[in-house]
Image (cartoon, rainbow, N blue to C red):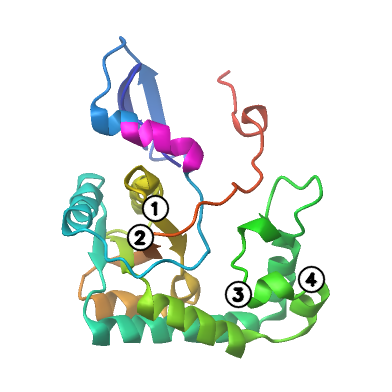
Amino acid sequence: MAIWHFGYLDRTVVRPVPGDPDLLARVSLGDEDAPTPKQEAFFAAIPKRRTNRQLFRDDPLPDELQHELVKAAEREGAWLRFADDRAQRNVIADFIAEGDRQQWANKHFRLELAAWLHPNAGDARDGIPKSAQNARDLLSVAGSIVIRTFHLGEGHAAKDRDIAAYSPGLVVLGTDADGPAGWLAAGRRLTACYCAPADEVWASYLDQPIEVPSLRPKVTEVIGHAGHAQNILRLGYGPNLNPTPCRTVEEVLIPAV
């Protein structure tokens, strides 16, 4: 969930009713004001925002951008750390590969994954079409029957390990608390990471260790930060791509009563 604070937005109160776990925030409208250039850049990036699973170029990320992402996470009540040390990055890449192996060994995981992947043609408004998948990924060539039936974890683990180890940026996004308030803080920060196309930088998830309970605490230990890892992202410069299908506003907006 992303909450933007410009234009007509006057006030954002995060989790205003502690006893209601489904209410994350209240946003009130105020007088119109002029957005800053940075806010305008973020706003222009919203329709371009998507997960980019393609291969990234080797171009390094600017130090200024890395510093801004770290500071922006702190402003949202989260933290973000770059895995710049080669040994540190290799360990996290190993965790990602091990997460792949454990998840692919789970039949229920394979069934759910197969349900989310679909060809470009069709009316599905959820999931990942073939056009959004990495052409060199096993998922892009394996059909849903193959994914449901066979354990492809070793091949997928090797591919994801290389992606993690050699992407221009590998970051861990986390929070001090691990609950709804922390998850919301991480989500607000994640939205800004995904608006990095304003800086022509793309992002994609490598969250396998976050989704495997035995691996998740090891990520924060390796990154050297107290708290709870919420996401692992790779950042870099890559090709543009078509967006994945989206639901309409009417389907996701709940009107006030």
Vertical relation: 156 (above or below) 47 = below
155, 114: nearer the viewer:
155
- Mark 3: which secondary structure? loop
Q: Note whether residue 95 is visible.
A: yes
- Which quadrant would the N terminus be assigned to in this image? top left
Q: Residues at badges 3 and 1 in contact (C-beta under 8 Å)?
A: no
Q: Residues within 10 Å of mark 4 (few under 14, many from 20)?
A: some
Label 4 and label 1: CA atoms lie apart by: 31 Å
**Near-viewer residue (120 or 206):** 120
Q: Magenta region, mostly helix, strand or loop?
A: helix
Q: Secondary structure at mark 1?
A: helix
- Camera-nearest residue between 22 and 27: 27
Residue shown at the point (35%, 36%) measured from the top left:
42
In the rendered image, which quarter contains the C terminus?
Answer: top right
Q: On the image, numbered disc 3 is attached to which residue?
A: 136
Residue designated by label 2:
178
Q: Residue at x 62, y 57 (%)?
A: 132
The magenta stretch is: 41-48
Residue identified by numbered label 1: 183
Query: Secondary structure under badge 4?
Result: helix
Amino acid type, callout 3: Arg
Q: SS at mark 2? A: loop
Q: Residue at x 37, y 38 (%)?
A: 15
- Residue 67: x percent and y percent? 17, 55
Circles 4 and 3, Cβ within 8 Å, touching? The answer is no
Q: Earlier in the sequence, mark 2 or mark 1?
A: 2
Q: Residue furthest bottom?
A: 154
> For mark 4, what is the residue?
144
Which is more foreground, mark 2 or mark 1? 1
